[in-house]
């Protein structure tokens, strides 16, 4: 059975700090089903409400609080939500108490919605931040999939993640979200004041901080509601701590200039050579990281013969990718220098200058001596 009660235009009386609304017929006869209530608070900063859900003990005529919700009123005006599951084999009488916290109003209305008999998922009851279920410990190479369901429009599923250190990751990628569901990220101040940090309404990743992080899964309020099962995946959005630069010319590995200090004469022809600059974004322990970036690359050589052919530049932009590639083509005029060194500048919009006029050689072939030399960049020769 599922019922919904709307208490519109309900007034908290003058001089009464506590107003009790009792549902004596709010009896759940089915073991394991859930009772939920939501208090939509007036959007008045001076008012502060607490919502209590209680069970009634007829033997001694007492109420036992089974759940409560009390967010400090702020500009979010977050609804107060409570829930309980009847895990007994008999009837349970529930009472709902709305506490105006000694600041009642006779003019500002609240709305109370109640649902009885919905199907509880394995994590219930977790309908407010104070009854959040903890995620397992998360690291930079793990993720968590949360199965559950929203059985009513007022169903709130809250989860908590504690993060000791955000040096490896400072956000979570959220995926597998049903169309009518939204995931929100919150923090709480010491005064139990909720602080909204992000929402999947406008982002695929939510920020986290060192310490306690709270996540609310709710119906997004658009379109007709229908009970929704979900299996939402939370994956670390890793921090870039290392950028590996790989450079290839005509498919060969480019080597740093210290390989040429032995004085051996090389005549390296680079007519219209294809140059590929590849940036790999990674954590300190070499886990690839998705990021947003724009990269500009310039190759130049003052000894290239034509004045207007002494440099070539190009750029590339990535979004939510772990690799950026900039492709260039060296000038068709080749130099007369025996060494024919090329100066390379690589500038990242996000991470700054990665190479500033670094002296490198463009190689379109190796002789036997070159093939025996070790590759000194961070990748593998011929990575293309």
Image: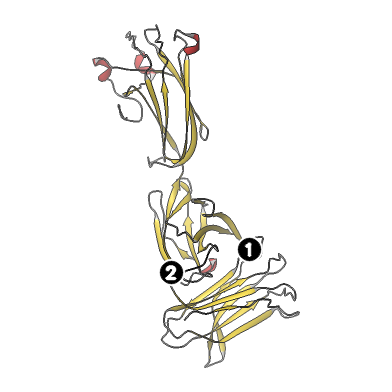
Tell me what residue is drawn at x 41 percent, y 54 percent: 138
Tell me what residue is drawn at x 42 percent, y 79 percent: 32
Picture layout, residue 288 above or below residue 217 = above
**In whole angstroms, how far apart are the C-alphas of marks 2 and 1?**
26 Å
Tell me what residue is drawn at x 41 percent, y 17 percent: 330
Residue 204 in percent (x, y) is at 49, 50
Q: Earlier in the sequence, mark 2 or mark 1?
A: 2
- Residue under numbered circle 2: 123
Crowdedness near tag 2: few (<14), some (14–19) or many (≥20) residues, C-alpha within 10 Å: some
Left or right placement of residue 380 versus residue 306 in this view: left
Q: Nearer the viewer, residue 71 or 199?
A: 199
Task: Identify the image's colour scheme: rainbow, by chain, secondary structure or one colour.
Answer: secondary structure
Residue 96 in percent (x, y) is at 58, 80
Picture layout, residue 146 above or below residue 2 = above
Picture layout, residue 141 above or below residue 46 = above
- What is the number of the mark on residue 191? 1
Residue 182 in percent (x, y) is at 51, 59
**Cβ–Cβ below 8 Å for labels 2 and 1?**
no
Tell me what residue is drawn at x 41 percent, y 86 percent: 89
Q: Tell me where residue 245 sits by quadrant.
A: top left
């Amino acid at each position: 059975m599922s019922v919904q009660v709307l208490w519109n235009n309900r007034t908290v009386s003058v001089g009464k700090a506590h107003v009790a609304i009792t549902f004596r017929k709010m009896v759940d006869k089915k073991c394991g089903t859930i009772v939920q209530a939501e208090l939509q608070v007036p959007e008045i900063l001076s008012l502060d409400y607490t919502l209590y859900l209680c069970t009634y003990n007829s033997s001694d005529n007492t109420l036992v609080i089974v759940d409560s919700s009390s967010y400090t009123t702020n500009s979010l005006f977050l609804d107060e939500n409570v829930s309980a599951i009847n895990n007994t084999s008999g009837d349970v009488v529930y009472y709902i108490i709305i506490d105006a916290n000694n600041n009642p109003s006779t003019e500002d209305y609240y709305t109370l919605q109640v649902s009885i008999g919905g199907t509880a998922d394995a994590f219930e009851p977790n309908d407010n931040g104070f009854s959040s279920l903890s995620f397992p410990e998360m690291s930079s190479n793990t993720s968590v999939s949360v199965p559950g369901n929203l059985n009513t429009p007022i169903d709130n599923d809250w989860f908590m993640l504690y993060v000791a250190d955000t040096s490896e990751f400072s956000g979570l990628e959220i995926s597998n979200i049903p169309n009518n569901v939204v995931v929100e990220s919150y923090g709480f101040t010491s005064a139990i004041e909720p602080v909204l940090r992000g929402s999947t309404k406008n982002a695929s990743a939510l920020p986290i901080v060192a310490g306690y992080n709270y996540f609310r899964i709710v119906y997004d309020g658009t379109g007709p509601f229908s009970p929704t099962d979900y299996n939402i995946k939370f994956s670390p959005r890793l921090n870039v701590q290392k950028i590996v630069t790989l450079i290839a010319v005509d498919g060969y590995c480019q080597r740093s200039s210290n390989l040429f200090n032995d004085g051996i004469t090389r005549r390296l022809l680079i007519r219209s050579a294809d140059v590929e600059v590849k940036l790999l974004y990674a954590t300190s322990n070499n886990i690839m990281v998705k990021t947003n970036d724009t990269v500009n690359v310039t190759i130049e050589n003052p000894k290239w013969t034509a004045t207007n052919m002494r440099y070539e530049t190009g750029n590339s932009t990535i979004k939510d990718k772990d690799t950026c590639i900039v492709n260039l083509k060296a000038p068709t005029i080749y130099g007369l220098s025996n060494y024919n060194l090329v100066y390379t500048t690589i500038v990242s919009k996000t991470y700054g200058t990665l190479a500033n006029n670094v002296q490198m050689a463009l190689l379109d072939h190796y002789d036997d001596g070159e093939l025996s030399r070790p590759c000194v960049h961070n990748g593998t020769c011929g990575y293309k």
